Amino acid sequence: MARRRRLGFWYRLVVVVAKPLLRLFTKTERSGAEHIPKTGGFIAVANHVSELDPFVVGEFLLDNGRPPRFLAKRELFRKPPLKWIFEGARQIPVDRHSTDAALALSAAVDALHAGECVLIYPEGSATRDPQLWPMRARTGVARLALLSGVPVIPIAQWGPQEILPYRARRPKLLPRHTMQVVAGPPVDLSAFAGKPVTAELLRAATDHVMHTVAGLLAGLRGGTPPQEFYDMRESA
């Protein structure tokens, strides 16, 4: 059996503060825990509806014995107190301005090869889709999956947006809202493996992952996901 990774002071501090608040102000409905690998590195890919998302999905993974490491833009690591928290909790900086996309993800690949869980929100920001379906995602998730060769576990969540909608200044804590989380089986990316890594291949693989996440989300909230993802660039 693999040794459970020590969380460290800063990671544990965030858990100690956040977990009781989640239990106090939310209810949970979870399913699909059997799809979370017990050992070995894997990428957890989730939809993004609120700034509260990392706590909801992070708790789900933590309660299943897989504390996630998050990808975060390097700028967040520059000034305290965020610098102390992100570095102390061993979160993973991503250099979005690197001219070498593979190099920008090297720390994440190292973490995955070390057997850790890396949690990604490929949309990069809370969705702007008018119906809150996943929007067009960045292709880093596909590149990371192909570089590392580890399983990609899709996760859908619904409920955090009821507490903290995008750009809301104050959370709506009462009445208690239900946080729904579901994990699915690993996404089959075999059709993309072993091929030249082109922009077109990365886009197709990323869309395949996000359509899987959207399908899981439909099971939580009902409705039919759009065939084409909302694109912020086209609506700007």
Image (cartoon, rainbow, N blue to C red):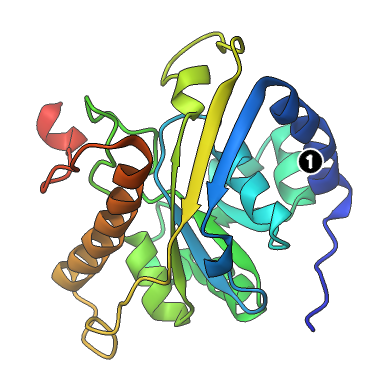
Amino acid carrying mark 1 in the image: Val
**Horizontal arrangement in the rendering, residue 25 relative to residue 97 (left or right):** right
**Horizontal arrangement in the rendering, residue 130 relative to residue 97 (left or right):** left
Q: Residue at x 39, y 45 (%)?
A: 47
**Horizontal arrangement in the rendering, residue 154 relative to residue 86 (left or right):** left
**Placement of 203 over or under 30, stated as above or below:** below
- Identify the image quadrant of the N terminus: bottom right
**Placement of 39 over or under 22, stated as above or below:** below
The one of 55 and 104 positioned closer to us in this rendering? 55
Is label 1 in a helix, a strand or a loop? helix
Q: Give x and y (percent) for residue 155.
A: 45, 54
Q: Give x and y (percent) for residue 234.
A: 10, 34
Is there any visible trace of residue 80 in the rendered image?
no
Determine the residue located farthest toward the right in the rendered image: 9
Q: Quadrant of residue 78?
A: top right
Q: Give x and y (percent) for residue 114.
A: 67, 79
The one of 117 and 101 positioned closer to us in this rendering? 117
Total numbered labels: 1
Binning the other alpha carbons within 10 Å of mark 1 as few (below 14), some (14 to 19) or many (20 upward) gives some
Q: Residue at x 23, y 27 (%)?
A: 131
| Residue under label 1 | 15
Q: Residue at x 20, y 63 (%)?
A: 203
Is there any visible trace of residue 184 in the rendered image?
yes
**Placement of 133 over or under 25, stated as above or below:** below
- Identify the image quadrant of the C terminus: top left
Q: Quadrant of residue 200?
A: bottom left
Q: Residue at x 24, y 79 (%)?
A: 197
